[in-house]
Image (cartoon, rainbow, N blue to C red):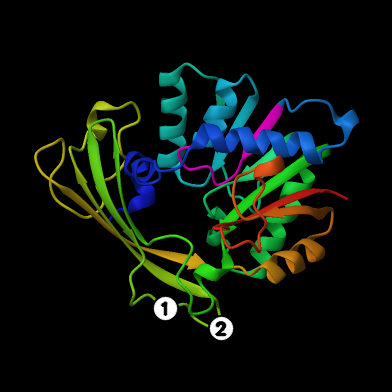
Amino acid sequence: MTGIYDDPWAYELACSFREVPAEVDVLLAWCAEHRPEDAGPVRTVLELAAGPAEHAREMARRGLAATALDLNPAMCAYAAAEAGRAGVALEVVQDDMTRFDLGRRFDLVVTMLDSTSHLMTLDAFVAHLRRVAAHLAPGGLYVVEMSHPRDRLGGDEPSVSTGWTVERDGARATVRWGEPTDRLDPITQISDDQVTMTIEGDRSGTRAGDRAGGGSGEGTGGRGPRVIRDVVPYRFWTATEVDAAVRLAGGLGIVAQYGDFGAGEDAVPLTGPEAWRMLTVLRPT
């Protein structure tokens, strides 16, 4: 049985509520703010655990030399096909975010959409950070996006809903990422999140980079709703654990943390009531 990560078109549809061009604007604004003046403009970017590589593709649209790295072969094929369809130059690499060695350095490295939740142990997180440090150019930045800690801790309402509806390219999808019965293990800090996605007007078969699997469900090609069901292991990281992992890894230091994509006067403090993400900006030490 294949799951949500084996169906890149469906995964991209599920995440289509994100405003990727606006987020890239902010990522580049943070580079202007936190990179040394003598570092020059950002020319090269690497997106890790990139999935469909929407942020890397947007960077490539802006003329940057962009590379997307992911472990899943279906995601890599889809990212390359979508970049080709859009006429942008994107290098796609299939590799592990804890072991990759590309033999060169980048002005900006990013990991978006809480993809570090796939790092299940402290050793894996530290190995990942050491690989990032080895690939950052002098004055380069690493921006990592995680869920806000309040989503998993405390009794308050979470920052984001576990259910939403999206529409894109004539398709409509209802997504539930997590159920009330999902529990975070207090020892491992891992939760098996139940994912259910119901798609109407499925047009994946008409797109470049067709889905690699069908998930579990019924109905394709617009013949009826298609349902994908999956269980996704999720590793929750606290802010203090991120700080500890950075110290253990060496070579990187935290220069800023934000609660949303916003720069300058629009910056959102991590501790602010409107914060809904934990975005950490790191730089070589």
What amino acid type should be assigned to the residue bearing mark 2? Ile
Numbered mark located on residue 56 in the image: none
Q: Position of residue 229 (x, y in %)?
A: 26, 59
> Residue shown at 20%/38% (left/top)?
202
Q: Position of residue 159 (x, y in %)?
A: 49, 62
* Residue 51: in magenta span: yes
The part of the chain drawn in magenta is: 44-53
Look at the picture and state if 68 lies above or below 96.
above
Where disc 1 sits, the SS reads: loop
Numbered mark located on residue 183 in the image: 1
**Residue 203 in view:** yes
**Residue 103 in view:** no
* Residue 78: in magenta span: no
Query: Foreground mark, 1 or 2?
Result: 1
Numbered mark located on residue 187 in the image: 2
Q: Crowding near pointer 1: few (<14 within 10 Å), some, many (20+)?
A: some
Quadrant where the N terminus sits is bottom left
Q: Position of residue 16 (x, y in %)?
A: 39, 41
Q: Position of residue 242 (x, y in %)?
A: 70, 64
Look at the picture and state if 218 lies above or below 25.
below
- As drawn, the residue found furthest toward the front would be 265
In contact (CB < 8 Å): disc 1 and disc 2: no
| Horizontal relation, residue 221 to residue 45: left or right | left
What amino acid type should be assigned to the residue bearing mark 1? Arg
> Residue shown at 17%/37% (left/top)?
201
Magenta region, main secondary structure: loop
> Residue shown at 82%/38% (left/top)?
35
Among the 4 quarters of the image, the one containing residue 37: top right
Of 43 and 175, the residue lying toward us: 175
Look at the picture and state if 192 lies above or below 142.
below
> Residue shown at 70%/35% (left/top)?
29
Where disc 2 sits, the SS reads: loop
